[in-house]
Image (cartoon, grey):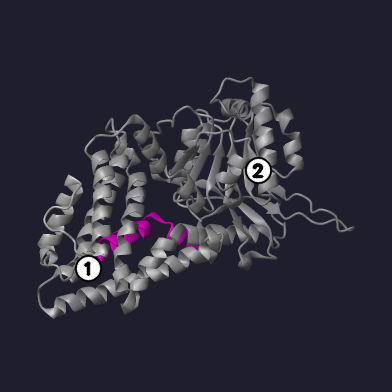
Amino acid sequence: MRQRLDRFIHHNVTEAIVGILIVLSVALMVVERFTTEAAGIRVFCEDLGNAITALFVVELSIRWYVARSSRWFWREYWLDVLATLPLARPLRMLRVLRLLRLIRLGIRLSRRTRRLTLLFEEGISQNLVIIASLVMVFLFGAIGISLVEQQNPNFGSFGQAIWWSLVTMMAGEPIGGEPTTWAGRLVTLAVMLGGFTIFAMFTGVISAVMVARLRTGMEAKEMELDDLQDHYVICGWNRAAPRIIAELQADPLTRNQPIVIVAELEHDPVLPREGINDGLIFFVREDYTSADVLHRVGLERARRAILLADKSRHRSDQDRDARTVLAALTIEKLNPGIHTCVELLNRANGKVLELVGVEEILVGDEYMGNVIAHATRTAGLVRALDELLRANVGNQFYRIALPPGLANQRLDEALIRLKHERNLLILGVEQAGKRGDDGGAEEKPQLLLNPPPDLILRQPDHLLVIGTGV
């Protein structure tokens, strides 16, 4: 349940709905504060705003439940929690804190538009956050000055407060009315400081250092990586990496999983625009053999780890395999339950990995040689593999748990039922490992390809099948 809720709350659709509700709640707050229409409109806006705030309470409750620690949740979302307190009438002035969620919305929008930045030479994504910051300061000034200067005739209407906030932010001094209270002066000071900094950045007076800082902020590495759970970690980079990413995102079972790539790259590589959602991809340009780096990318919370024969730097094949083995050992130490797939250049270097529980070890040159040799002898093999190894074309391989209804049945009976009911073809049976008589360590699962028809299936066996979906 916790994993399902985590996937739900971090899903793209959920994030989009939360963003829309944030904008709507701010708009309702403005309308409610400045409307001069009949009281019914204000009551409607107030009731709808309270309903949206209640949805925020539910959202934050789910985020707290799925967070890896309460301390991390409160450090990350304490302002968002304060923004929900206006459900209590004495705390209604705190509704202005909803504006702070516009900054978080701007950061998330910037990540969703990274693909658009490839069409332009300079930073749409950076400007989105600057615009969101400007809107936040602008609305804060208008709403704040109207709340604390209610007796001041200079701020009695919606138009006056909006105009005062706009020109004060642009000019850097109060224009259109002087506040008479200390709270009003603090609001004025905040608007002027916001105009000095954010608006100056927006109008183009921004240095290369600030651009670099914004780009780092826009990547939101630290904040976003702390949010990730059940994600994929790819260590290393070579020409196969874009294809791996495309295949993971083509599969309906994994297309919404975030992917963290850790490699010593000088720049983020340009990924193909077709078939890849780069909003779910994080690049960390550091050494993946470091335990600190793996900890920072959330390796302990990851679902899968993929280690490639890294070609981001010029090294010998032996050095590449040595780094891969070191990283695999570190990963198994940090997260013993993770499923790890490792690419090596020399199979002899993988003996130690089998001892520590690495599930999949591949040697690319060996597999390519085997495929070419078999394709030479077996006509049509390449066409079959092209379909089976591509997630968005026809049939694929799947590993599924033995359905309860097939337990204690013969393989030939199960094969007929699965073919008839789900159009799945059984290729093999993975039998769970057994413990020794002395209670020692459990043996590795045994995969039986093309097993005999009289094999009795038992729980907790798994089936290797071919099908168009499971």
In the image, residue 391 sits, relative to residue 350, either above or below, namely below
Q: Say if 393 sits above or below 408 in the image.
A: above
Q: Is residue 330 left or right of residue 282?
A: right
Dot 2, crowdedness within 10 Å: few (<14), some or many (≥20)?
many
Question: Taken as a whole, is the magenta stretch helix, strand or loop?
Answer: helix
Left or right for 59, reference 447: left
Q: Is residue 20 magenta?
A: yes
Where is residue 319? Give x, y as percent. 66, 24
User: Where does residue 345 sit, x and y in percent of width and height?
Assistant: 65, 26
The amino acid type found where label 2 is placed reads Ile
Decide which of 244, 452 is in the foreground and name it. 244
The disc labelled 1 sits on which kind of residue?
A: Leu
Quadrant assignment, res 268: top left
Is 234 left, or right, of 27 in this rendering?
Answer: right
Query: Image quarter for residue 381?
Result: top right
Q: How far from the left and from the top, in percent, is residue 105? A: 33, 54
Q: How many marks?
A: 2
Tell me the tag on residue 313: none
- Residue 28 is at least partly visible in this image: no
Distance, label 1 to label 2, CA atoms, is: 54 Å
**SS assignment at label 2:** helix
Residue linked to disc 2: 331
Q: Nearer the viewer, residue 395 or 193?
A: 193
- In front: 214, or 55? 214
Determine whether, in the image, residue 82 is placed left or right of residue 389.
left
Considering the numbered disc 1 on the image, is that residue within a helix, a strand or a loop? Answer: helix
Which badge, 1 or 2, comes first in the chain's sequence? 1
Which mark is on residue 147? Answer: 1
The magenta segment: 4-25
The furthest residue to the right = 438
Residue 321 percent across, percent down from the top left? 66, 28
